[in-house]
Image (spheres, grey):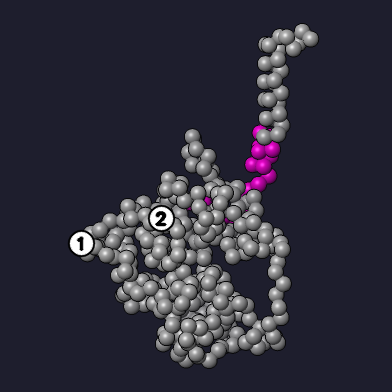
């Protein structure tokens, strides 16, 4: 009983148990994880600009609404090409000596997951407009606007980036809306968020609880294609909108578009795969097809969805036609 009456022995024993358990349960496993986990071979560290953008991402509380983790369940398939693994976070270091806000995996998805947002939405114009006024690109968005990251000037200076804002969101603004350096840094960080491809020969973990897919038709027919509406939603809708009408003064409409309804399939596929620099009143389109590694079947499904939606009534195209053009694009871009 003397042991329980001696407060010094009790305190030292409790402290020793606490330190010992901490070493065994927390510190040793953490050290082993650091030794056993390494970044994937093609991992790209953040650039200086993206690193500053990450600090802005933290300062503005973006992590409160956006996660950066793709779980291995089928409902997360829209956020990335594969479930996340430990190696995806192995190359991320502390923000600074005092703060360990490194991975920003988040705890709640009030907004979309950002693990692969750099591939899903690579457009700088879209991201800047989304920061300035989210509802300009997503009508029902509950994300707050960040107008303090932008300046109003009479003219665009050298190396400055103007944000193309639809007239409906320019009320009371007569000058040019210019992105601040902090806004550009933040977009650089967002654009850097891409899943690193696994090394050749490595199979990714499968998504669990997959939904059963109904048979789509005979092989080689236009019915044997992925869901064009879903592909449009994941790759095109953020700019061209769910109704295909685009945004006046920012992104061109696909509804009634002469390119969508026309017979020049080569131009159509080139725009999807290589991007497009349209008329001055619209923002430049990124190479969505190339950036997102879209297959001929996926590109065909997107084209057929756009040619038969929102009142469009054009002839569907086949995978063979699209593949022929994509193969030619690959040959010419390699030269």
Q: Which residue is mark 1?
A: 154
Element assignment for label 1: loop
User: Does the magenta portion include 33?
Assistant: yes
Of the 4 image quadrants, the one containing the N terminus is: top right
User: Does the magenta portion include 36?
Assistant: yes
* Mark sitting earlier along the chain (2/1): 2
Foreground residue among 199 and 211: 211
- The relative height of residue 282 versus residue 202 in the rendered view (above or below) is below
Q: CA distance from mark 2 to mark 1?
A: 26 Å
Q: Which residue is mark 2?
A: 144
Residue 191 lies, in percent from the top left, at: 47, 59
Element assignment for label 2: loop
Which residue: 70% across, 34% down?
25
Foreground residue among 63 and 242: 242
Q: Nearer the viewer, mark 2 or mark 1?
A: 2
- The relative height of residue 324 versus residue 25 in the rendered view (above or below) is below
Q: Residues within 10 Å of mark 2 (few under 14, many from 20)?
A: few
Residue 322 lies, in percent from the top left, at: 56, 84
Where are the magenta residues, as a range? 27-46
- The relative height of residue 202 versus residue 90 in the rendered view (above or below) is below
């Amino acid at each position: 009983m003397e042991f329980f009456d001696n407060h010094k022995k009790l305190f030292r024993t409790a402290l020793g148990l606490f330190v010992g358990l901490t070493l065994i349960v927390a510190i040793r496993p953490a050290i082993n994880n650091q030794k056993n986990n390494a970044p994937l071979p093609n991992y790209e560290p953040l650039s200086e600009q993206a690193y500053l953008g990450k600090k802005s991402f933290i300062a503005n509380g973006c992590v409160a609404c956006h996660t950066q983790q793709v779980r291995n369940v089928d409902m997360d398939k829209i956020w990335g090409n594969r479930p996340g693994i430990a190696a995806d976070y192995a190359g991320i270091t502390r923000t600074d000596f005092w703060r360990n806000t490194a991975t920003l995996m988040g705890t709640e998805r009030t907004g979309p997951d950002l693990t692969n947002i750099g591939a899903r939405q690579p457009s700088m114009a879209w991201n800047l407009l989304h920061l300035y006024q989210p509802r300009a690109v997503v009508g029902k968005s509950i994300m707050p606007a960040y107008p303090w990251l932008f300046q109003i000037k009479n003219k665009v200076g050298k190396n400055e980036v103007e944000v193309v804002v639809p007239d409906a969101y320019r009320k009371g603004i007569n000058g040019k809306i210019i992105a601040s350096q902090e806004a550009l840094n933040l977009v650089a960080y967002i654009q850097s968020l891409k899943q690193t491809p696994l090394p050749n020969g490595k199979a990714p973990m499968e998504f669990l609880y997959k939904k059963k897919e109904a048979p789509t038709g005979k092989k080689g027919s236009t019915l044997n294609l992925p869901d064009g509406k879903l592909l449009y939603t994941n790759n095109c809708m953020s700019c061209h909108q769910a109704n295909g009408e685009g945004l006046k003064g920012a992104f061109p409409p696909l509804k009634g578009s002469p390119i969508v309804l026309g017979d020049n399939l080569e131009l159509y596929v080139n725009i999807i795969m290589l991007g497009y620099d349209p008329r001055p009143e619209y923002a430049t389109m990124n190479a969505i097809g190339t950036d997102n590694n879209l297959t001929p079947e996926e590109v065909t499904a997107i084209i057929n969805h756009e040619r038969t939606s929102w009142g469009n009534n054009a002839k569907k195209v086949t995978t063979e036609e699209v593949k022929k053009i994509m193969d030619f694009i690959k040959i010419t871009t390699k030269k």
